[in-house]
């Protein structure tokens, strides 16, 4: 059966034959052209229209000039999905919807240029093919919307692109087309002011979306204040040279078109440090005249009692003018009359800065300039104490403007390494040495808090400041408002050289008025309480239900009843209960364990809802071996019989058997395990939170104590040589921990550098709990460890046990030493001569087991984690240690037994893999051998008695690493955790987590 016959048969079966008369009526189908384009159709003798209707349209064939079926279906996938013939779709609907028939025919352009008087009734393609082409009317190719957005912005510099990338010129490509198709993906820059890689690196959402970065910036990025490069700051330029209230022009476009030629600066100056004591001084002895612009808002249209009290206090120091961004109930503004010079209420939708701007417009800058200080204050705070101390302290300070406290970081930038500092930084240090660093960051996020700001004459009279305040406009979202008018105002004033100061004398870690640091601010005389801390608690400060008690402890006699009444009115009782009891066992439970495992964001959300019981302590087992051993096991043993603490052992793929009271053992990766983990007030890990806990546990709601798994010789964590490309992620992991432990003052310094951003105050010098098992009498060891000692003694059978414990290598089997047959014969003979047996224990994370395979002929004992989970028992039974760079040699010094280091590749290992905290030759308690010949010589004298000098040297090296040579390290850890969480009684309201932690 030939092709024509088969098509005719299909015509009888299919519905597409109905398209033939409809296509014919269009008058567009070009039979001759179709046969010329597709000789297979002509050769088969098939009617071209029939072929197109049945088969050709689906194959994307062209039915006439300027209609590209394949292009049309690809560009409009909804048409392809509908199954409608593309030519029919275009003629019935497409051209009316601005859908183009091909890449070379722009229907909208044709309609505008040639059919403007037709009233949208004439199909442009029909008109062009029927008469327009004969009349010589032009057509226009469809313009790429990406190219249109970029061309309209005038940012793409074709000359710059061609000069930087001559391969584009040699290839004859249009520079913009090349950038759109290839250049952006290759990281090429379209302009000296747009850095493609920089933009994508700092805007991960754009990178993930796949949108062209320059197109994104031109269409939306500049409106969101995303900077195109290090050299151009959108909001600074916008507010400095354009109208900050108008979103009519891309600031970079303006700079390229006009600003550069006019000598405008593309970004703030980089050298913005401020000398201590610089700035405006009030005249000695003269009374300071102040004007206060007070911004209000109340959802119920009321002037609350706390607002009256706050305004009344401000009126002691300033002339107060009040404007509320809401409609007020009748008579409410009268409550302020005794304390203000004017009070108004109008809904303007510009938030607090809109009220400040509105009051400026009412009063005029000339009137404001008659005062010594201009205050911007809002009603987001409750007044706790008089403002006498605030004004007395600040009147004596030279500065151009000031606030109560400063903040580094906003919610979107909380995870940046620069925002992970954990201890207050003196404000003189910030002004003198850190402002330049802040300026260099992509997202500028340093601000003097805007709820209480004070400006002196140098700022009041600055035209740029006035322009910013006059230009306050409504914003699409709160983030943009913060970036423009809170962060942005700080940056502009700093960049213009206006010296600032703060009442609180230090820059506290992230948003201190919304975190547990707030209660430390009260000790500095801080006079306010942010309502958002109590009503939203958006950073999950635990145990805020005791807020009134904690404040009264610091400010006796403070009126908390007025605050409580306002909270009860504006915050729903359920919401308030939930926010105040975060991290408390008084939070309403969310039910028993579920039936499915929670993952990712679902787990994190459940963790934040779940109550936290301070007397629940969780012990996840080792993430590598699945064993319950080491430091976490020692802490467990210390408290296992304490009925006041619920001990939860979370297992992996191995069973764990322990005794004690109030002990539960369950799989970590189970609904019950998740349930217990989310409710545990303290969690003890030995690696990283993610590695040990699997789930995204909220570090700010739990005391995650990192016990680590040894005293590190090699650099680890933030200090490790091979981690330098992942420092951001490592810092984020460490920041989840409340503390990490150490063994000595020297070890504390190493751990502080490794666990950045934890400060040295969060490194507890308690000693390593697992070393209690080395020093403790045998009869006081756990029964399973006593059993391991007996089993090991049986295996050793009276011989000397020589432990071989090499460290982990990144390269695994390619990184270990390969012993020759001759060297293995020497080792066998040496073992025989000394009545010794080799005990093989390779690193828990090592999966290659190269040494076990190599030295099998020496009949070594298998002392791996699977058989002897508690390495301390090996130390007790052994006679000597052979290692390379494993930190086990440090713990082994507690045994007073000999050790040898086989450091055959020391320079490579320390230079390429990790690096070391210490000089191996300086700290190792024995011979450091760089060749097998040196190792053989050291082994021959291994069991000889130490000289007096060697004994003294060992004692000195031991004290470098051990401040505590006893079996009380676990007890010291427990005591430190109790200081964080008072576990003196089940059901007792939780004690406050240590302030500043």
Image (cartoon, rainbow, N blue to C red):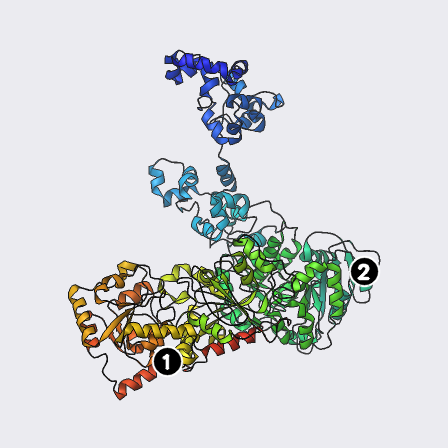
Viewer-proximal residue, 292 or 870? 870
The image position of residue 153, as x and y in percent, is 52, 42
**Residue 507 showing in the rendered view:** yes
Instruction: Using the rendered view, name the quadrant where residue 772 is placed.
Output: bottom left
Q: Nearer the viewer, mark 2 or mark 1?
A: 1
The image position of residue 60, as x and y in percent, is 45, 24
Residue behind mark 2: 333
Residue 724 — which label? none
The image position of residue 550, as x and y in percent, is 66, 73
Q: Is residue 213 above or below residue 172?
A: below
Residue farthest to the bottom? 948
Secondary element type, mark 2: helix
The image position of residue 319, as x and y in percent, is 75, 67
Q: Is residue 544 above or below residue 260?
A: below
Tags 2 and 1 touching, CB below 8 Å: no
**Residue 451 showing in the rendered view:** no
Residue behind mark 1: 960
Viewer-proximal residue, 634 or 189? 634
In the image, taking residue 714 as reference, residue 253 lies left or right, namely right
Specify which label sits upstream in the sequence, 2 or 1: 2
> Looking at the rendering, in which quadrant would you find the C terminus?
bottom right
Crowd tier of the residue under label 1, counting other residues whose Cα lies within 10 Å: few below 14, some 14–19, many 20 or above? some
Q: Is residue 144 above or below residue 233?
A: above
In the image, taking residue 13 as reference, residue 345 lies left or right, namely right
Residue farthest to the left? 822
Crowd tier of the residue under label 2, counting other residues whose Cα lies within 10 Å: few below 14, some 14–19, many 20 or above? many
> Looking at the rendering, in which quadrant would you find the N terminus?
top left
In the image, taking residue 440 as reference, residue 306 lies left or right, namely right
Spatial CA span between label 2 and label 1: 70 Å
């Amino acid at each position: 059966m030939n092709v024509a016959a088969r098509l005719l048969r299909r015509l009888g079966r299919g519905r597409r034959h109905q398209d033939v008369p409809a296509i014919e009526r269009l008058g567009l189908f070009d039979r001759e052209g179709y046969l010329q384009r597709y000789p297979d159709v002509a050769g088969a003798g098939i009617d071209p229209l029939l072929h197109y209707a049945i088969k050709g349209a689906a194959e994307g064939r062209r039915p006439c000039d300027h209609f590209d079926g394949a292009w049309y279906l690809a560009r409009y996938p909804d048409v392809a999905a509908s199954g409608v013939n593309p030519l029919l779709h275009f003629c019935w609907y497409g051209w009316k919807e601005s859908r183009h028939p091909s890449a070379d025919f722009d229907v909208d352009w044709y309609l505008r240029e040639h059919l403007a008087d037709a009233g949208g009734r004439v199909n442009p393609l029909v008109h062009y093919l029927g008469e327009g082409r004969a009349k010589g009317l032009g057509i226009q190719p469809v313009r790429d919307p990406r190219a249109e957005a970029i061309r309209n912005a005038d940012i793409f510099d074709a000359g710059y692109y061609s000069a930087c990338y001559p391969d584009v010129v040699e290839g004859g490509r249009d520079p913009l087309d090349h950038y759109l198709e290839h250049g952006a993906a290759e990281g090429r820059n379209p302009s000296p002011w747009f850095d493609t890689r920089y933009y994508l690196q700092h805007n991960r959402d754009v990178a993930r979306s796949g949108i062209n970065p320059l197109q994104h910036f031109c269409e939306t990025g500049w409106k969101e204040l995303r900077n195109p490069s290090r050299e151009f700051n959108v909001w600074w330029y916008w507010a400095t040279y354009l109208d900050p209230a108008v979103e009519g022009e891309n600031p970079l476009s303006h700079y390229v078109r006009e600003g550069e030629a006019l000598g405008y600066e593309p970004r703030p100056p980089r050298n913005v440090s401020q000398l201590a004591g610089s700035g405006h001084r009030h005249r000695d002895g003269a009374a300071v005249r102040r004007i206060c612009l007070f911004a209000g808002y109340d959802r119920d249209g009321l002037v609350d009692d706390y607002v009256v009290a706050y305004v009344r206090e401000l009126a002691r120091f300033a002339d107060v003018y009040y404007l509320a961004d809401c409609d007020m109930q009748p008579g409410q503004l009268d409550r302020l009359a005794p304390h203000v010079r004017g009070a108004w209420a109008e809904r303007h939708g510009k938030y607090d800065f809109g009220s400040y701007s509105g009051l400026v417009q009412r009063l005029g800058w000339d009137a404001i300039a008659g005062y010594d200080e201009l205050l911007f204050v809002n009603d987001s705070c409750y007044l706790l104490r008089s403002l006498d101390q605030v004004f007395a302290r600040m009147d004596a300070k030279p500065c151009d403007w000031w606030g109560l406290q400063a903040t580094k970081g906003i919610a979107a930038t909380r995870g940046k390494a620069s925002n992970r500092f954990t201890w207050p930084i003196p404000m003189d240090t910030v002004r003198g040495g850190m402002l330049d660093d802040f300026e260099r960051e992509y997202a500028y996020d340093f601000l003097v808090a805007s709820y209480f700001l004070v400006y002196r004459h140098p700022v009041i009279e600055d035209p740029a400041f006035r322009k910013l305040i006059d230009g306050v406009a409504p914003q699409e979202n709160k983030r943009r408002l913060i970036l423009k008018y809170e962060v942005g105002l700080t940056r502009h004033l700093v960049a213009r050289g206006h010296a600032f100061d703060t009442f609180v004398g230090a820059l506290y870690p992230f948003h201190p008025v919304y975190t547990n640091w707030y209660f430390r601010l009260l000790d500095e005389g801080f006079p306010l309480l942010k309502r958002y801390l109590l009503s939203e608690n958006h950073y999950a400060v635990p145990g805020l239900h005791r807020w009134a008690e904690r404040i009264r402890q610091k400010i006796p006699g403070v009126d908390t009843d007025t605050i409580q009444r306002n909270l009860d009115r504006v915050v729903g009782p359920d919401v308030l209960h939930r926010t105040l009891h975060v991290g408390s066992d008084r939070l309403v439970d969310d039910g028993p364990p579920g039936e499915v495992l929670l993952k990712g964001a679902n787990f994190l959300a459940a963790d934040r809802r779940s109550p936290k019981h301070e007397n629940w302590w969780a012990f996840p087992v080792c993430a590598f071996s699945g064993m319950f051993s080491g430091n976490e096991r020692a802490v467990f043993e210390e408290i296992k019989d304490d009925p006041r603490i619920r001990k939860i052992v979370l297992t992996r793929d191995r069973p764990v058997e322990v005794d004690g009271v109030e002990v539960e053992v369950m799989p970590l990766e189970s609904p019950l395990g998740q349930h217990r983990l989310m409710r545990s007030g303290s969690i003890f890990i030995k690696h990283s939170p993610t590695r040990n806990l699997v789930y995204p546990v909220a570090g700010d709601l739990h005391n995650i104590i990192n016990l680590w798994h040894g005293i590190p010789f090699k650099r680890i964590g933030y200090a490790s040589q091979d981690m330098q490309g992942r420092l951001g992620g490592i810092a984020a992991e460490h920041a989840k921990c409340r503390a990490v432990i150490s063994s000595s003052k020297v070890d504390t310094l190493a751990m502080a550098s490794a666990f950045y951003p934890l400060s040295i105050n969060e490194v507890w010098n308690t000693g390593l709990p697992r070393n209690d098992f080395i020093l403790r009498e045998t009869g006081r060891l756990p029964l399973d460890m006593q059993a391991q000692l007996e089993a090991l003694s049986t295996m050793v059978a009276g011989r000397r046990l020589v432990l071989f414990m090499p460290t982990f290598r990144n390269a695994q089997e390619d990184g270990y030493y390969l012993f020759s047959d001759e060297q293995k014969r020497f080792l066998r003979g040496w073992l025989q001569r000394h009545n010794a047996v080799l005990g093989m224990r390779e690193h828990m994370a090592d999966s290659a087991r190269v040494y076990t395979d190599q030295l099998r002929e020496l009949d070594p004992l298998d002392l791996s984690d699977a058989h002897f989970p508690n390495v301390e028992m090996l130390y007790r039974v052994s006679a000597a240690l052979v290692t390379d760079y494993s930190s086990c040699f440090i713990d082994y010094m507690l045994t007073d037994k000999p050790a040898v280091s086989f450091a055959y590749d020391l320079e490579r290992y320390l230079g390429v893999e990790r690096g070391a905290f210490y000089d191996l030759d300086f700290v190792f308690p024995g011979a450091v051998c760089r060749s097998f010949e040196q190792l053989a010589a050291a082994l021959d004298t291994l069991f000889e008695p130490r000289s007096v000098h060697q004994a003294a040297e060992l004692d000195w090296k031991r004290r470098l690493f051990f401040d505590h040579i006893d079996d009380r390290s676990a007890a010291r850890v427990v005591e430190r955790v109790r200081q964080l969480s008072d576990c003196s009684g089940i059901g007792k309201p939780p004690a406050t987590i240590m302030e500043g932690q």
